[in-house]
Amino acid sequence: QPLSSEKYVVEGKNVTLSCNYSTTGTVNSLQWYRQYLGAKPEFLLQVNEYSSKSEPDLRLYSKATKEIKRVDLEIFSAAVSDSALYYCALSLITEFAPLLLLNN
């Protein structure tokens, strides 16, 4: 769930996008995607609940905070080319029960 629907920033300034999440499952990873108008979403970066990640070439930094169930994406030195729709997503760890196959 986004914390705000739109962000306005002065070119050259940093901007932080935040996303709250709620789940009863175990989080495997949290991802950020960017979608330009008329284009498909593109993957930016991925973190888990205990890590942060930096993508210097993209001027991006992301960090998840498990205690408050929030993941942030910071864009450094924002440019007009950063104008897009940003998505956060999460993937859960799927646990399977042991399976016993019996042959008659």
Image (cartoon, helix red, strand yellow):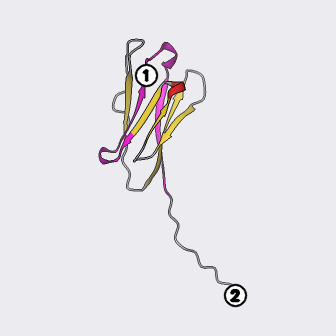
Q: Residues within 10 Å of mark 1 (few under 14, many from 20)?
A: some
Task: Look at 60% across and 25% down and name the residue there.
Answer: 39
Helix, strand, or loop for circle 1? loop
Left or right position of 24 against 41: left
The reply to whether residue 46 is visible in this rendering is yes
Q: From this viewpoint, which residue is outermost toward the bottom? A: 104
Membership of 91 in magenta stretch:
yes
Q: From this viewpoint, which residue is outermost toward the left? A: 68
Left or right position of 73 against 36: left
Helix, strand, or loop for circle 2? loop
Membership of 73 in magenta stretch:
yes
Left or right position of 103 against 75: right
Q: Which residues are magenta?
A: 64-93
Q: Amino acid at mark 1?
A: Phe
Mark 2 to mark 1 CA distance (whole Å): 64 Å
Task: Look at 39% across and 29% down and name the residue there.
Answer: 17
Q: Residues within 10 Å of mark 2 (few under 14, many from 20)?
A: few
Q: Nearer the viewer, mark 2 or mark 1?
A: 1
Position in image of residue 88 (x %, y %): 45, 37
**Residue 43, image quadrant:** top right
Instruction: Look at mark 2 in the image and give the residue it sits on.
Output: 104
Task: Look at 41% across and 56% down and name the residue there.
Answer: 25
Q: Amino acid at mark 2?
A: Asn
The reply to whether residue 6 is visible in this rendering is no
Instruction: Look at mark 1 in the image and give the residue it sits on.
Output: 76
Position in image of residue 10 (x %, y %): 38, 12
Q: Quadrant of the N terminus?
A: top left
Name the foreground residue: 76 vs 43.
76
Task: Look at 30% across and 47% down and name the residue there.
Answer: 67
Position in image of residue 79 (x %, y %): 47, 15
